[in-house]
Amino acid sequence: MNTKSNEQLVKIRGLKIEGRSDETWNPIINGVDLDLNKGEVLGLIGESGAGKSTIGLASMGFCRDGVRISEGTVEFDGIDLIKASAAVKRSLLGKRIAYVAQSAAASFNPAHKLIDQHTEAPTQHGVSGRKESEEDGIELYRRLRLPNPDEIGFRYPHQVSGGQLQRAMTAMAMACRPDLIIFDEPTTALDVTTQIEVLAAIRDIVEQFDTAAIYITHDLAVVAQMADKIKVLLKGDEVEESDTRTMLANPQEDYTKSLWAVRSFERPKKPAVSTGATPVVSVQGVTAAYGTVDVLHDVNFDMHEGRTVAVVGESGSGKSTTARCITGLLPPRIGHIEFDGAQMPLDYRKRDKTQLRQAQMIYQMADTALNPRKTIGELIGRPVEFYMGLKGAEKRKRVEFLLDEIELEPSKFIDRLPSELSGGQKQRIGIARALAAEPKFIICDEVTSALDQLVAEGILKLLAKLQDELKLTYMFITHDLATVRAIADEVVVMKDGKVVEQGEKEDMFKPPHHPYTDLLLSSVPEMDPDWLSNLLEERGVDNIGDAAVDKM
């Protein structure tokens, strides 16, 4: 960790925050105190709805719409941000205080290139000119291990992967070398190998420029590598706080101990697939391209009824592109897709309604996947009507049944908007919407990566229960190897658009491994504050990305 300073930067006292609902104000944060010195990193942890992001935003003097600070003080470098004028806040935000959002896809302006958005803050705040800030942006892209750093900034947000976009946002926050950065789950969209590189780059820049940081995360192993001290929150209350090593070694409160003990769920081993059994989905010799560049190369694997195939690999390895080929969103250039032994039309527009409903998707970011203007009943009801032809009372009855299936009380949720739900509840709605088509096969695309570990475990248990009840087949795209251990029956490892290894889960976690699989397994963070430093030293601290490539 970085050397601590005794110079205080952030001082929060008696912070109380309320949210508005049905003309009444309800408590969200209940009198929290927070101290942060220059160059110090504070980890905020707790389950979904604990108030982590709300406190992070409040430390900038900001509240979301429908939320207000009702009591307390928030001081940044002696400036009272609650009483400060809008002009004072504008002079600080982006320059001395920066924010890295959890959902980069929802935070970037889709109409502007990455480099244009990167240079906006330093040029408007007079930190540097356009050319200088552009050159600095390219250097930050390089330090954050983005591919083609000289060119990637000239792409639009939709032209890069989610993991790459998250790193571009981290670079953008660092553009003015701020005194304080709030990192709100900055690595949830990243695979384990990229996560190491980004964590190392963040830690390096924080130490080099004596930057203070509030690091919000649900990943305890990650916060162990980044934070000097940890504050645990539960439903707007502070549970306990101490330095990182003490917190990891000897948590005092039962709730903190429960966080340390999560992710115990693991599905029992299923019987082997019968010889000659017809797979529900078969990917056969698929090569696919974006434009003229092939991004998948002769991909082959099968998925059988009632089983879960986890597809793992780093950002850009071809996991989601393979899913797009299966669903017909990206027709393969070579090869074909079979459902129950029959070839499917490669383009979804040529599939009939029965073929379309067989493959459904649950998306990584429920925030961007659910229309914010539609009620839960409307969101689930649309596929019910489209695929099943139900209307009126019959449609509502089916929607209520699906809400029961995902363990949400229909009377409480059917008329709500997505903004009124927690992250875990929104992900459950995504599951219900996929089930509405009564598919045989569901693609789960990083469905737990944005969720805290307690909520993620609940989602995994729900998916397992639904699979057993409905004999569903899952393709589970993930970079979280703990999730793979919990739910997968088989594992497919991808790199650079190719399948490098595949097999039963038990075999995949036993050596010998393909060098790339070994790299993935060795990159899973551990609950040891020295783990990242030791790994960097082992691989070459000054050039971890190249060291990782050399190991392959």
Image: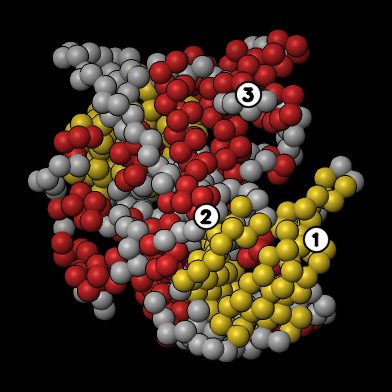
Image quadrant occupied by the N terminus: bottom left
Please report whichever mark, 2 or 3, sits nearer to the chain's N-terminal start. Answer: 2
Whether label 3 touches label 1, CB < 8 Å: no
Residue positioned 22% across, 74% down in the render: 537
Local SS, label 3: helix
Percent x, y of residue 453: 47, 46
Q: In the image, what residue type sits under mark 3?
A: Leu
Whether label 1 touches label 2, CB < 8 Å: no
Measure the alpha-carbon separation of dots 2 and 3. 34 Å
Residue positioned 67% across, 19% down in the render: 400
Q: In the image, what residue type sits under mark 2?
A: Glu
Residue positioned 50% across, 39% down in the render: 363
Residue position for label 2: 253
Percent x, y of residue 138: 43, 76
Local SS, label 1: strand
Q: In the image, what residue type sits under mark 1?
A: Arg
Residue position for label 3: 403
